[in-house]
Image (spheres, rainbow, N blue to C red):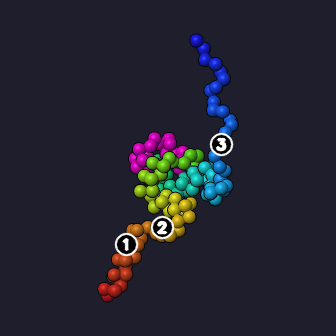
Amino acid sequence: MSFPKKGKSFPKRGKSFPKRGGHGGSDFSLDDHAFAMKIASALTSELKDRNSRAKLVAGWTGANERTVRNWISGRYAPCGRHLVVLAQHSDQVLNAILLMADRHDRFVGGNVEDLRQKVLELMAIIGE
């Protein structure tokens, strides 16, 4: 018994999804490549050691090293689950996500360690 070749895809009639920027849609204009490049830029600036960068990120996320190298090069973006793990480990990735989401009020202004160092310096000045 052979199956007919007709009927392997969905019909092209009926309702369609609304276009971006249409009725009630978002004006979010970031395409997939731009998103991948922003995450790649954040990963690159966070992890300056070129030799072990992919291994470190693969250890964080549990993803394959080849997949991580594709993220770092900007070829592909991480999926949601991996993106959350990256944001847990990287302030730069978290900041990139917040900036893309236009959430400047939640922006992590600087590295927490830098702030801690400045507080210690200020305490030393006050203590003198």
Q: Neighbour class for label 3 at 10 Å: few (<14), some, many (≥20)?
A: few
- On screen, residue 7 versus residue 77, left or right, reads right
- On screen, residue 41 versus residue 64, left or right, reads right
The residue sitting at 36% across, 85% down in the picture is: 125
Give the mark nearer the N terminus: 3 vs 1: 3
Q: Which mark is residue 116?
A: 1
Position of residue 42 measured from the top left corner of the image (x, y, whole percent): 52, 57
Position of residue 74 measured from the top left corner of the image (x, y, whole percent): 57, 49
Residue identified by numbered label 2: 106
- On screen, residue 38 versus residue 11, left or right, reads left
- Nearest the viewer among 65 and 39 is 39
Residue identified by numbered label 3: 15
Amino acid residing under circle 1: Arg
Q: Neighbour class for label 2 at 10 Å: few (<14), some, many (≥20)?
A: few
Q: Residue furthest top?
A: 1
Position of residue 99 measured from the top left corner of the image (x, y, whole percent): 55, 63
Task: Say what secondary structure mark 2 lies in.
Answer: helix
- On screen, residue 53 versus residue 126, left or right, reads right
Task: Say what secondary structure mark 3 lies in.
Answer: loop
The residue sitting at 44% across, 43% down in the picture is: 63
User: Is there CB contact under 8 Å for labels 2 and 1?
Assistant: no
The residue sitting at 61% across, 17% down in the picture is: 3
User: Is there CB contact under 8 Å for labels 2 and 3?
Assistant: no
Position of residue 103 measured from the top left corner of the image (x, y, whole percent): 52, 65
Amino acid residing under circle 3: Lys
Q: Which residues are magenta?
A: 57-72
